[in-house]
Structures are given as structure tokens and as C-alpha cells.
Image: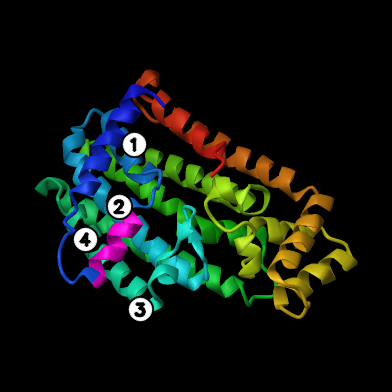
Amino acid sequence: MNKDIDRYLDLITKAMESVPLDREPRALYEPVDYCLKNGGKRIRPLMTLLACDMFGGDINEALPPAVGLELFHNFTLLHDDIMDNAPLRRNQPTVYKKWNTNTAILSGDVLFAFAGKYISRVPDNVLRQVTDLFYQTVTEVCEGQQYDMDFETQANVTTDEYLKMIRLKTAVLPAACLMTGAIIAGAPEQEQNKIYRFGESVGLAFQLRDDWLDVFSESTEFGKQTGGDIIANKKTWLTIKALELSNNRQRKTLQDIFSGSADNDDGQKVQKVKAIYQQLDIGKLAIETMESHYTEAIRQLGQVDVPGERKITLENLARQLLNRKK
């Protein structure tokens, strides 16, 4: 990473550490503190600062809402881990596993309250636009999560339906982070929309990479349980594409596994699904699809009306996200 990114990440880290969590009751705030200190790449607040800087804005004005967006992201993780029955997050026990479900729900709620407070700390002339964008994003993330849960019991899901779901659940947040930075910098509306579309495409590529890593990474690198999506019967792009390309025998095996009718422990379940993925070359197809969304992201970034040298850091960041191992 270049020195600007390192400097911005340092600013974000210090701002996150200043969130006032040393307060009572400890049973509420200790899990929040644990969540925020448990790693994380801080990519979303970084995007806010980079977009603000790219359009010539004051990053000090963008820092509070950048923190707010990161707090909201962590709120979603607390609640998603409960809904997904996820035991690990960043190689550590998830909050609901370390404490309990009720604690994770309530700690998530207070995180959301802090997120809204920090989001509102923007110049008055952009307050309405920034908060409207934030609550639109919150709504869309919830819609995406509901689609994701619906897919668990829906017999047939298409790749287009899946991409719509991850656009809402995952991609609109980085898009909103970038657009927030652009708004604060005073970028014209058409440029705000361009950087938003760049963020959507990056977000789609990011989630497809996440799907791929869930199956094909080492858990020590990924920071989550390997095959966690398979164990939780979640239909990812890989699952949907495998069902689309499979023969009758492969399809029946997949359907039996994901319906719970097959008698497998978690390890067997992951191994059998992974074997079918390998037979159908699903991993390669997923990587090709990620690359296509990355290419679209770079095309969108290329249309942003600022000098090319100002775009280099965001372009490099998008590539790093696509090639990450965790």
C-alpha cells in the first residue's frame, strides 16, 4: 500500500480507538470493544477518505462519517453471525459465541446508534444528503439480508437473483462510502453517481471473492470457518452455478446435501460439495466472474472526471481486494 493509504488507515485507527466505549454497563460495551478491536481491514472508511481526497475535499470532514460507516459495517457483522450461525470472525469466536445471542443483538444495536451519531457529524450543507444516503443504504442492506435468508429455503435461485442480493447486502455499502466522500468534497452529482457505480462493481467482485475463499482458502488465512456457507446451507454463486451446470447425479447430491436429507457431518458435507465444484471447474468460473466485475469497476472509475493520477490509489485498492487471501 502507498504512503497515503497508510496515513489514512492510521487516522481511521486512531478515530476508531476514540469511540467512547469505556462506559457502563460493561456487559453491553465490552462485546462492542471486542468486535472493533478484533482486526478488520477498515476498507470501507478508507474508501470514504480516498474518494473525498480524489475530488479535492478535506478528509478531516470525511473522517467522522467514515468511522460511522465502519461502525455500521460491524453492526451488520454482529447480527449476520447470529443469523448465519457463524462460529468464527477474523479467526476469533464471534460475539454471540463468546457471550450469547442476546448480548450480540443488544451490542449490535448500540453500535448502530453510534454509527448514526458519527454519520451526522458532517458539514451542515451536506447533512441531509449524507444521512439520506446512509439510511437508504441501511434499508438496502436489510433487504439483501432478507433475500439471502429467503434463498436458504427457495428451491431455485438464479445467478441473476444472487447478484441482485449481493448488490444489496454487500455492494451498496462500499458504494455509499465512496459517494459519501464525494458528497463531502462537493463533487458534482454525476461524478457522485459514477463513483457509486464503481463501488457497486468493486463490492460485487469482493463478495464473489468471499464466496470463493469460503471454499478454497485455508481457514487460518481466511479467518472464518472453511466451508461455513456450505455448512449453513447458504446458496452462494458457486452453489447456484454448480446446480445450473451439474448432471442429474451431481444435482441430486447437491440438493440432498443442502436440504439436510443427506446423512453427513459438517466435514463430509463440505468435502462432497467441494468435490462437485472441482468436477465442474466452478472455482475457475467464479474467478472469471470476479474479474469481469473488476473490469467493469475500472471502466466506471475511468469515466470519473478527475485527473488520472488521482484515480491510481483507488484502482490499486480494487485490485488488492480482488486478489486478497482473507
Query: Is any part of residue 140 visible from this angle?
Result: no
The residue that label 1 is drawn on is 191
Given this view, does label 2 or label 1 mark the residue nearer the observer? 2
Given this view, does label 1 or label 4 mark the residue nearer the observer? 4
Alpha carbon separation for disc pair 3 and 4: 19 Å
SS state under label 1: helix
Q: Main secondary structure of the magenta part?
A: helix
The residue that label 3 is drawn on is 102
Relative to 108, say whether 183 is above or below.
above
In primary-sequence order, the first of circles 3 and 4 is 3
The residue segment tinted magenta is 27-36
Look at 18% across and 32% down and name the residue there: 58
Contact? badges 1 and 4 (CB < 8 Å): no
User: The disc labelled 4 sits on which kind of residue?
Assistant: Phe
The residue that label 4 is drawn on is 114
Relative to 218, say whether 33 is above or below.
below
SS state under label 3: helix
In primary-sequence order, the first of circles 1 and 3 is 3
The residue that label 2 is drawn on is 69
Query: Is any part of residue 302 visible from this angle?
Result: yes
User: The disc labelled 2 sits on which kind of residue?
Assistant: Leu
The chosen color scheme is rainbow
